Image (cartoon, rainbow, N blue to C red):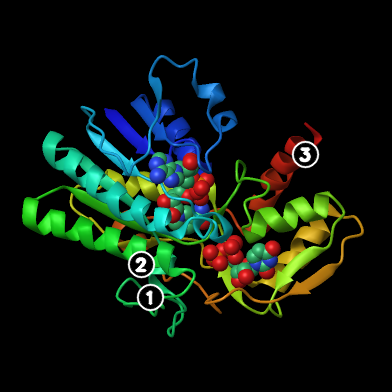
Amino acid sequence: MRILVTGGAGFLGSHLCERLLGEGHDVICLDNFFTGRKRNITHLLQDPYFELVRHDVTDPFKYEVDQIYNLACPASPPHYQFNPIKTTKTSVMGAIHCLGLAKRVQARVFQASTSEVYGDPEIHPQPESYKGSVNPIGIRACYDEGKRCAETLFFDYHRQNGVDIRVVRIFNTYGPRMLPDDGRVVSNFIVQALRGEDLTIYGDGTQTRSFCYVDDLLEGFVRLMNHDSFIGPVNVGNPGEFTMLELAELVLEKVGGKSKLSFHPLPGDDPLQRQPDITLAREKLGWEPKVPLEQGLDPTIDYFRKLLEG
Ligand code: NAD
Ligand code: UDP
């Protein structure tokens, strides 16, 4: 198949391009390089079945493709809050452009949605039926509401125009090729520990997240995209839940060194807890994660060690 991956030079997108090429597909990677990096995909540039396009999803685009994975959107809070208006535009207009293209060329289109659609959740763990608790005027809203609106557009294009959609709700995912200055907690803690700096805990560190290794996540993506009839939305994430203090302890144990913890104010609207209910993914996709945090941290630490040395 010929497959378009928007945001293909980013953390998840570059792994996805690699996987799709490995499966024998023709891949078009579209990215504006806001948080994506050429180094994530330079090893793919020699492949005759890989094409790279510098483009912004807020402007329309047209390609004859069979499938579209829409991943274009900054994912880390400091990056999506850098230009919040642009973040909303990227989610909403990016979705409209992907859906319009899918309608025109009859492609199947996949939306990388997020656990952020649940906001600061009142029920725990979160099933897909939970409608969420998002502050529409807070500092995370540009991302959360942008992604919620994108889901709305996906389901309306599906109902109104019969567009063939797939929607996945991704929970915190980590692995090699995250940016070292990304601002997300896993990359921050590892980079700080490798540099011998103190690990920055926001709030008292008792807030929780559930961390999924990138390879597990991509298996869920591909299973959903190639499912005959199940369109989602479906949670894909690792139910193993950790406080930020536990994560810091684990990283320090693995990296060693003299780093201590330093405490900083909790950013606005930071969810207190998050854990996916993956019953639906198990039932419909036969999917569950295989890599525990303890194990997935090793290749991630190796990646950052080499990057910092380089
Ligand atoms: P990332 O920031 O590494 O990747 C996003 C990519 O999109 C980058 O390559 C960036 O340059 C590109 N991009 C941003 N705005 C664009 C625009 N206007 N036009 C074209 N390209 C643009 O983040 P990631 O972790 O790889 O996330 C990929 C997708 O998955 C995002 O949509 C994100 O919201 C979603 N997601 C990720 C996680 C996670 O934990 N990694 C969790 C939930 C959802
Ligand atoms: N966090 C932290 N220290 C950091 C970066 C983040 O304690 O250096 C916290 C952050 O406040 C949040 C959690 O870690 O509670 C996860 O943050 P991240 O930005 O990785 O993802 P998200 O909040 O979007 O789930």
Comparing marks 3 and 2, which lies closer to the viewer?
A: 2
> Which residue carries the number 3 mark?
308
Ligand 2 located in image quadrant: bottom right
Mark 3 in CB contact with mark 1 (< 8 angstroms) = no
Provide the secondary structure element on which disc 2 rests: helix
Q: Which mark is residue 136?
A: 1
Tell me what residue is drawn at x 21 percent, y 50 percent. Answer: 165
Q: Earlier in the sequence, mark 1 or mark 2?
A: 1
Relative image position of residue 67 (x, y in whole percent): 25, 37
Real-space Cα separation, disc 3 to disc 1, in angstroms:
38 Å
Relative image position of residue 210 (x, y in whole percent): 55, 66
The kind of residue on which mark 3 rests is: Leu
Q: Which mark is residue 145?
A: 2
| Residue 246 visible in the snapshot | yes
Relative depth, front residue between 224 and 26: 26
Relative depth, front residue between 55 and 260: 55
The kind of residue on which mark 1 rests is: Pro
Real-space Cα separation, disc 3 to disc 2, in angstroms:
35 Å
Relative image position of residue 173 (x, y in whole percent): 53, 55
Q: Is residue 191 left or right of residue 120?
A: right
Q: Earlier in the sequence, mark 3 or mark 2?
A: 2
Which of the 4 image quarters holds residue 225?
top left
Tell me what residue is drawn at x 81 percent, y 60 percent. Answer: 252
Comparing marks 3 and 1, which lies closer to the viewer?
A: 1
Q: Earlier in the sequence, mark 3 or mark 1?
A: 1
Q: How dense is the environment of label 2, judged by Cα within 10 Å: few (below 14), some, or many (20 and up)? A: many
Real-space Cα separation, disc 1 to disc 2, in angstroms:
7 Å
Relative image position of residue 43 (x, y in whole percent): 56, 23
Q: Quadrant of the N terminus?
A: top left
Mark 1 in CB contact with mark 2 (< 8 angstroms) = yes
